Amino acid sequence: MVSLTLKNIPDDLIGVLRKAAVQDHRSLNQEILHILSVSLQSRLQQTEVSRYIEAYRQNPESPDELLGLLETSNDVLSELAWDDQ
């Protein structure tokens, strides 16, 4: 695994991160990794959904087919999901 050093973290941000870590029963490092993981998964999902919506707009198919594409997309994204423990 790779190590990463963060510098110049504002005091108020580190305070919020520490509180979140305590509430979630995680170390500060685990909390930061969890937040990054959730954020990146959300971004990937939004990108994937946007791609299917744009494809649908350019070549409209039945709503059932669009739902099938979105379900397939969710399956693919779940395979890409990081282990955030």
Image: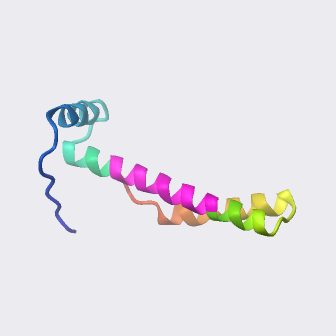
The colour scheme used here is rainbow
Instruction: Choose between 24 and 42: the one closer to the eye.
Output: 42
Q: Main secondary structure of the magenta part?
A: helix
Residue found at x 76% / y 57%: 67
Instruction: Choose between 24 and 41: the one closer to the eye.
Output: 41
Residue found at x 16% / y 38%: 10
Question: Dividing the picture into quarters, in which one does residue 9 lie?
Answer: top left
Instruction: Choose between 10 and 82: the one closer to the eye.
Output: 10
Relative side of 32 to 10, left or right: right
| Residue 49, image x, y percentages | 63, 58
Does 48 appear in magenta? Answer: yes
Q: Which residues are magenta?
A: 35-50
Relative side of 46 to 67, left or right: left
Does 81 appear in magenta? Answer: no
| Residue 47, image x, y percentages | 55, 60
Relative side of 82 to 47, left or right: left
Name the outermost residue toward the right: 62
Instruction: Using the rendered image of the protein, determine whether residue 74 is visible from the camera's viewpoint.
Output: no
Relative to 78, say whether 29 is above or below: above
Quadrant where the image shows the N terminus: bottom left
Residue found at x 63% / y 64%: 51
Question: Dividing the picture into quarters, in which one does residue 68 lie?
Answer: bottom right
